[in-house]
Amino acid sequence: MSGIVQNNILRSSGTIAVSAAGLNWSDTIITGSTVTVESGNGYWINTTSNTCTITLPSSAESGDQIVLIDYARTWGTNKIIIDSNGLNYQGNSDAYTVEYTTDGQSVNIVYSDATKGWLPLEDDVTAFEPGSPFIPLQLALFAYGEAGSTVSLKNLVNSSGVVGSDVSGVGTARYACSAAGYGNNKAIFAYGANSGYADISLSNLVNSSGVIAADVTGVGTARESPGAGTYGYDKAVFAYGTTGSVTNIKNLVNNSGVVAADVTGVGTARRYSAASKYSGDKVIFGFGTTGSVVGVTNLCNNLGVIAADVSAVGTAREALGAAPYGTDKAIFAYGTAGGGVNTRNLVSNVGVVASDASGAGTARHYLKAATYGGDKAIFAYGYTNANVSMSNLCSNTGVVASDVSGVGTARRLLGAAGYGN
């Protein structure tokens, strides 16, 4: 063949440059802290566990191209650092630090010449569009509890945070149960102790209209006071609690509300912890008591896997409430550390717990909390020196408001969850 290759006029070697459409994509997900890349290739960079330093080729020709993609949308937490390996990057020598620190970013670089070196053709950020989309829950309900004796009643909460009057419940009257959302717009109450103070293993499903169904014989160890939250957008997890002694077992709930068998847990065995969804598809379990109050948290990923203890920031306490707010964050508030408190701790969208902030409203414990109105939370009921019937609304910026006189039977040790969209 003779003549000039017209689509390769930038190269001097006679080698045809690979076009963007013809990039060779690595079939390995890069998870290490360092990687050396080659021209003509695309790479999936997963920084879930660490920052990654990416070393570019030591020599390049005009038209050489490399594409890097944030595989797990974690560059905002663990950045990538580009080492231009002796060549310039956007006209600067490799003595300068090149970093990309935005979740969902992709970087498409092309080599120009010795003066400008590598130039970004694109450094776009892709919108987060999960396969199971986040659907904000508008309504909430509080159910069951102890009011001098165990009760089976519920109180619905509308999208403005107004608590409705008592509705006679369905299912076994009990206290020290927990609840979480599942299936995008439904909820499940499970576990607890009955009127004879015996731990039980049963569940009650709540439909998207707030109607509680009859008892379903439970799977897993009968226990009371576990924590519960929604993970993976449409599933639930119950973990920790007491069977007479504290435990860290967990039970996953699928998106049809079916409770799975026990799984050996991770982290400090305890009861009276609280749990909340955060980051849209994960759960944080926090605080509780082993006999002595603890200040630890455990993150649960979007597959329902609970991680090891993390020392929490803030007052160690038990019997507090937790709920999501602002669509991707969470809040822990109230509880007892030998006496009732109204302290709150905000949780970021990556599960980092902030230090204590002064709370609002009556200090109390044995209350519960739920999301409502799409991006807000409500704390309600509980115990001071007696059962109380009050609520406190939490804004979408994590600010807890003063007491609102409650509606319905004053009680403690109940369950709460968001539902309906």
Image (spheres, helix red, strand yellow):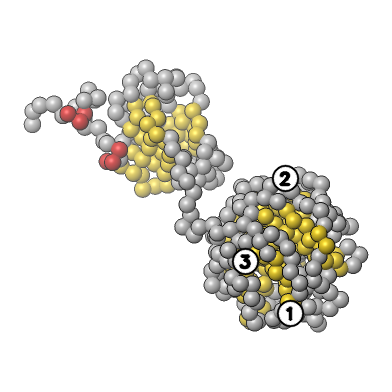
- What's the amino acid at mark 1? Ser
Residue 36 found in image quarter? top left
Residue positioned 47% across, 46% down in the render = 127
Q: Does residue 103 appear to the left or right of 353 in the view shown?
A: left
Q: Does residue 119 appear to the left or right of 133 in the view shown?
A: left
Is the residue marked by circle 2 packed among few (<14), some (14-19), or many (20+) residues within 10 Å?
A: some
Q: Which residue is mark 1?
A: 168
The quadrant in which the N terminus is found is top left
- What's the amino acid at mark 2? Ala
Q: Which residue is mark 3?
A: 419
Q: Residue furthest left?
A: 1
Q: Which residue is mark 2?
A: 354
Q: Does residue 356 appear anywhere in the picture?
A: yes
Residue 196 found in image quarter? bottom right
Q: First in sequence, mark 3 or 1: give its number.
A: 1
- What's the amino acid at mark 3? Tyr
Percent position of residue 128, x then y: 49, 49
Q: Give how far apart the Cα atoms at labels 2 and 1 are.
A: 39 Å
Q: Secondary structure at mark 3?
A: strand
